[in-house]
Image (cartoon, rainbow, N blue to C red):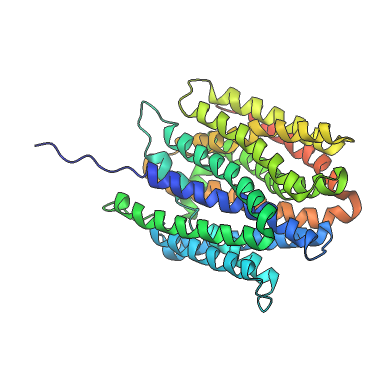
Amino acid sequence: MTAPERRTYLRPGFALALALRLLTSSLAIVIPLYATSVLGAAAAEAGAFVVLLWVGNAAGVMIATMLVRDQSASSVAGFALLGASAAALASGAHFVPFWLEALGSGMGMGFPQPFLSALMHLESSPERPFRGLGIYSTALGVGLVLGPLLAYGALEFFGFEGVFGALALVCVMGAVGAIMGRSSLEGRPRPPAPSPSRWGAALHEPRFRRAFTVNFLYSLLLPVFLSYGAISAETRFGLSAEDALVLFAGVFLVSTGLRVLATNSRASLGRLLLASTGLLLASTLCMGLASTWPLFVVGMVLFSLPHAMVYPIASYFAFSSVKKPDVVNASYAFQASSGVAELLAPAAAVVLIPSVGVQGVFLLGAVLAAAALVAAATGPR
């Protein structure tokens, strides 16, 4: 009699990653648009709300990692909190300050995140070692496409209240998916507590350190692209909020297609990472130097490849550089490269925009992109 086949977490993980990225991509774009379009905030003031979103995200990740350490429980809690914040925004509940709603949304974003990528990576077989992270990154890509499209449709017909109401419904779906995926995790060890000594050991590995550096530099640019790309499209080139959302959806659609192709690709991941960081530099230069909207759009489209490849390939190099029992703990340290960057970048943008403008922020980002290219081109692969 053969033992029953163990259920994998790939399908539940795909559903959770899709719902989470749909929500985060929508909020990162819609919150600053809401602040400028409805609240009348300046670009720098809108950036402050983005900072709160990522502060909340960092707090949610820390609570899930330090206190909960249960993928299903933290996911349900996160979607519940995010759903409550979105519902408050949809209802126009003025007794809840907008800054608190942004902070609560960020915390909800953070709860499901810290274990998911490592769980997906551990589901890969030796014959297809990139499959788990490939499927995970594909789910992120699909969520990124659907997020702006959902926001666009809701905004077009129901206004910002409709956008936040639709996001609250997505949170319900995410919570249901987290509950249904619980059986796939039964019998598995609880995620380990954070171990600074294991983080240090991982950072001593040259492949891990290289992946960490590239992802950190890329993650400094991602929130700027998401939040200030839309504002730049509006203020510099006269695109509407709806136009900006459609443009983002197109960029993410290209990115998702590239991720699907990479999941089973036998191409050199090192070369893909190098090409991606090269286009990251070209993208930031186009967006920073653009004097016409077609050149700006070219810059956004060029962002598709780095957006598709940098995070999943860097994750793979980082996770595969440590022993299997240390993958989850190593993922905590690796994700810190994203979390810290996604907090620092919006805060720096708030300080810089009054003096250099949104366009200048993208030009300064080109320096970071060049550093990422250098890091990708050097060191072990």
Left or right: where does residue 348 sit relative to residue 160? right
At 26% across and 52% down in the image, what residue appears?
187
At 40% across and 53% down in the image, what residue appears?
177
At 88% across and 35% down in the image, what residue appears?
292
**Looking at the picture, does residue 365 appear above or below residue 64?**
above
Left or right: where does residue 125 sit relative to residue 272? left
Instruction: Tell me where residue 122 appears, x and y as whole percent.
Output: 38, 40
Instruction: Tell me where residue 140 appears, x and y as whole percent.
Output: 54, 43
Q: Nearer the viewer, residue 186 or 234?
A: 234
Residue sitting farthest toward the top: 267
Residue sitting farthest toward the left: 1
Quadrant housing residue 108: bottom right
**Looking at the picture, does residue 340 appear above or below residue 161?**
above
**Which image quarter holds the N terminus?**
top left
Quadrant housing residue 57: bottom right
Say whether residue 370 is visible: no
Left or right: where does residue 353 sit relative to residue 198? right
Q: Nearer the viewer, residue 37 or 368?
A: 37
Instruction: Tell me where residue 238 appears, x and y as whole percent.
Output: 85, 45
Instruction: Tell me where residue 242 appears, x and y as whole percent.
Output: 73, 48
At 48% across and 34% down in the image, what residue appears?
134
Q: Nearer the viewer, residue 138 or 132?
A: 138
Quadrant housing residue 346: bottom right
